Image (cartoon, rainbow, N blue to C red):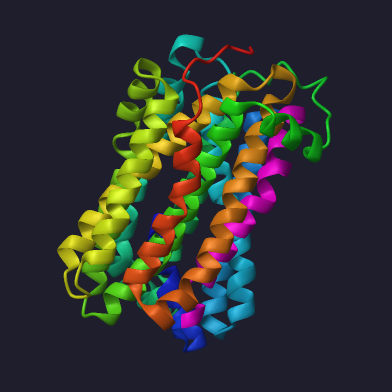
Amino acid sequence: MASGFAVAGLLAERISGSTSTAGLVATSTTIGAAALAVPLARLARSRGRRFALTVGYVIGTVGAVLTIVAAQVSSLPLLLLAGCLFGSGTAANLQSRYAATDAADPAHVARALSLVVWATTIGVVIGPNLTGAGARVGDSLGVLPLAGPYVFSVVALVLSLVTVWFGLRRLPRPQTASVERQPLAVTFRRVMAIPHARLGLLAIATAHAVMVGVMSMTSVHLQHHGASLTIVGFIISGHVAGMFALSPVMGWLADRLGPIPTIGLGLATLAIAMTVAALAADEAHGLTAVALILLGLGWSACLVSGSTLLSSSVPADIRTSAQGLSDLTMGVLASLSGTAAGPVLAQFGFHWLAVLCGLLLIPVALLAATTKQSIRSTA
């Protein structure tokens, strides 16, 4: 999927002819991921993780195919619809991290969760570096070169759904399947009433919104200032390596130090990333790469520790719904961030985009600073 993400903004700009629309594909993808988060969680509750993840990857595959079609017919509306469906793959990837917690040792939940996040490293690092090869594949297939990387996305999603369907046959269903029937609004109120769960949910959502807002515009910013597709792919690869490669370290820190200090570490890293991005010169691609790597590391720390904090803090009867609610919330906030990112880049530039995203960190940082560390298990 990362090979498609790397060129999504460029593809939207090419079809529409406007920089302001460059963030819409990333936004539609996050909207799709958000919209499917709760339905997939409900499927996981009623039919098991295996069935839910498979459905998610099937829908994502359809989205990748439709993206190629949209590029061929130069249809922005179809491209945005395809992005929504493509987001199902993202939703499935996000919910796969909770599959590891279903049977994990309570003392090592964060490490189990982080290993699933880490397992995606190879794909997300290699993917953006396939942009050049994808363009050549697209050209050989007679499709728009910028749509070529989505061919690799189709292949990856098909492999994922086959692996999940045949590889997770023995994964147990959540034990709360028969009792967890509360409406989403009730789940939201119960989660927000628990300080640790509230912090976990908001840390995940805020970090994701900051990441999407900046990352979705990075390829456009770089190309506007002389970077080739190869350089763009290299920088995005560094970013996604930061997101996933050190996730086991983040899991170890969350288990050893506690999820709240690890959230604080993640927020501090995100703040440094935004500072570097805001101060770097437009042509300083090396500094932009540093900012993107730090952005990935901060996101990883917040995702792993926030997910652990949320799952460890809520009662068992709403755990699966709370996990879906978390993915929905992060998708909604990221959609808003991605929607605003294009116009901000067009009107004010990449530096102010970084500043504004940095300001989003302040409320959750204050919440983390005022939340007590101790966690009582609710298993």
Who's the residue at 38% across and 34% down the image?
A: 264
Position in image of residue 196 (x %, y %):
57, 26
Position in image of residue 205 (x %, y %):
54, 46
Who's the residue at 58% across and 12% down the image?
A: 377
258 relative position to 61: left or right = left
Outermost residue, bottom direction? 17
339 relative position to 179: left or right = left
Quarter of the picture holding the N terminus:
bottom left
Q: Which residues are magenta?
A: 20-47
Q: Is residue 32 visible?
A: yes
Residue 97 vertical position relative to residue 280 in the rendered view, above or below: above
Who's the residue at 45% across and 75% down the image?
A: 344
Quarter of the picture holding the C terminus:
top right
150 relative position to 78: left or right = left
Q: Is residue 135 visible?
A: no
How many labels, in total? 0
SS assignment for the magenta stretch, majority: helix
